[in-house]
């Protein structure tokens, strides 16, 4: 009873509580998987109908200009920029995260110069980053060295060209020290490339403030862009002139409609563009970003920590002793916006939870993962999730 009452008090005091009505969520569902696929902002279906019916159906090819389709990648990049602490003109939206990992890492290796022949990658990373890093290193004649994030500082040296790191680990929910690690990478004369998939929209990133070189992230998690929504690429302004994309497609050309045989890169963020933007997904993302109007990322972070603290508190109070192990660090400075719990039969437990209306996910081999999206998850949801988890166990 204590935790039910406490949840009601916390919800009553929650300044972001009003944002939940901006989302379409099934009645009675506790959705704790916004770190994999964010919920649907209620305004998106109407906007998509307009894009398909009027902009595509009626205006047809005129929409590239008249509906602003052509400039959508940079325009939407500028909408994402304040959420990750970047000034305008440094982010371009398009392609998948995997493709942007490739652009960013090869771009960073090229910026670092020929004499630096080693690339460091987080050994515990979400697999696609590791796969792409291996290929990027192979193609550029560098050696790939996978290291655990805590080993990065010792691994840096005069050979290091670039380091690809995750701001928040997808499995453990561990938040890494982006300012400190970026500074260490710079002290070694290398470039830092950060994957923001699990932090953007959940906590302050401070790309400009901390001097990050390049970054990428998806938009379908805490940014609620929808399944397969395009990812983004950040190239710090100071690197843009020398950023040499390994995928120099025609839409990143200085004069795309000049259709010249020679490639001449465009200025600024648009140099990160490749081919024709995926307009339907991109404009769904643009509409979904309206939910951030007037939202301060610091208040999102404060609520995220309160939600995750409360979840740990409820699980500790309700769950049978010894059945669960906490994977995510308790220290706020080391925690993203998810709680990962180790449990022997995690796969079966998660299926049972989902059947009872509490959606999280299972990650091999034994992790129950719960993501807390502060714009639409409340404290009563948290209490219910912990209670149902305890019942299932
Ligand atoms: C850290 C990280 N990088 C990359 C990806 C995915 O890449 P893509 O959007 O290309 O599927 C994910 C999750 O899907 C992720 O968690
Ligand atoms: N991107 C995904 C997809 O297309 C299907 C299923 C899941 C995903 C994910 O986002 C996985 C996610 N990056 C993770 O943290 O596990």
Image (cartoon, helix red, strand yellow):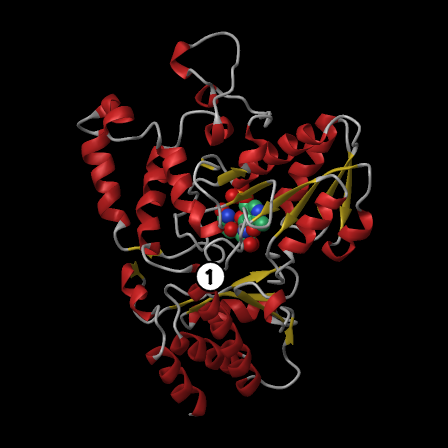
Residue 26 appearing in the image: no
Q: Is residue 88 above or below residue 28?
A: above
Residue 370 in the image, given as x and y percentages of width and height: 52, 66
For label 1, the crowd category at 10 Å Cα-Cα, with few meaning under 14, some 14 to 19 and many 20 or more, is: many
Give coordinates of residue 290: x percent, y percent.
31, 51
Which residue position holds label 1? 33
For the C terminus, give its image quadrant.
Answer: bottom right
- The residue located at (66%, 83%) in the rendering is 322
Q: Position of residue 326 (x, y in %)?
A: 64, 73
**Residue 238 horizontal/vertical position (percent):** 57, 34
Q: 43 or 331, which lies in front?
A: 331
Q: Nearer the viewer, residue 39 or 260?
A: 260
How many discs mark residues in the rendered view? 1
- Residue 300 sits in quarter: bottom left
Q: Is residue 226 left or right of residue 322?
A: left
Residue drawn at x 58%, y 47% as measured from the top left: 195
Look at the picture and state if 153 lies above or below 32. above
Task: Say which residue appears at 50% left-offset and 60% top-offset.
Answer: 203
Identify the secondary structure beneath mark 1. Answer: loop
Residue 145 is drawn in which quadrant? top right
Above or below, 97 relative to 150? above
């Amino acid at each position: 009873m204590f935790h039910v009452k406490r949840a009601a008090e916390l919800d009553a005091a929650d300044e972001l509580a009003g944002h939940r009505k901006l989302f379409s969520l099934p009645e009675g569902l506790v959705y704790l998987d916004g770190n994999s696929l964010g919920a649907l902002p209620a305004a998106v279906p109407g906007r998509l109908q307009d894009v398909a019916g009027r902009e595509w159906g009626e205006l047809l090819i005129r929409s590239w200009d008249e509906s602003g389709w052509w400039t959508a990648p940079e325009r939407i990049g500028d909408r994402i920029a304040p959420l990750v602490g970047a000034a305008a003109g440094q982010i371009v939206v398009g392609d998948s995260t995997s493709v942007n990992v490739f652009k960013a890492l090869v771009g960073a290796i090229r910026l670092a110069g020929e004499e630096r022949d080693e690339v460091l990658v987080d050994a515990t990373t979400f697999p696609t980053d590791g796969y792409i890093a291996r290929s990027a290193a192979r193609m550029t004649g560098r050696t790939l060295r996978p290291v655990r994030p805590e080993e990065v500082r010792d691994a840096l040296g005069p050979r290091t060209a670039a380091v690809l790191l995750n701001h928040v680990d997808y499995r453990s929910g561990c938040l890494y020290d982006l300012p400190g690690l970026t500074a260490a990478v710079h002290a070694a004369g290398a470039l830092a490339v950060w994957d923001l998939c699990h932090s953007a929209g959940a906590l302050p990133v401070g790309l400009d403030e901390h001097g990050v070189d390049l970054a990428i992230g998806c938009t379908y998690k805490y940014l609620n862009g929808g399944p397969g929504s395009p990812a983004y690429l950040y190239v710090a302004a100071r690197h843009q002139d020398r950023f040499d994309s390994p995928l120099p497609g025609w839409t990143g050309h200085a004069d795309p409609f000049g259709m010249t045989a020679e490639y001449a890169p465009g200025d600024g963020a648009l140099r990160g563009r490749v081919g024709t933007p995926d307009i339907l997904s991109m404009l769904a993302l643009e509409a979904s970003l309206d939910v951030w109007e007037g939202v301060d990322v610091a208040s999102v972070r404060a609520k995220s920590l309160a939600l995750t603290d409360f979840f740990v508190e409820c699980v500790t109070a309700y769950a049978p002793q010894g059945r669960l192990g906490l994977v995510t660090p308790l220290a706020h400075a080391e925690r993203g916006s998810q709680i990962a719990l180790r449990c022997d039969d995690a796969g079966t437990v998660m299926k049972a939870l989902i059947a009872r209306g509490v959606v999280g996910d299972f990650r091999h081999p034994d992790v129950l993962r719960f993501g807390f999206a502060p714009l639409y998850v409340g404290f009563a949801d948290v209490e219910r999730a912990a209670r149902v988890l305890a019942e299932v166990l």
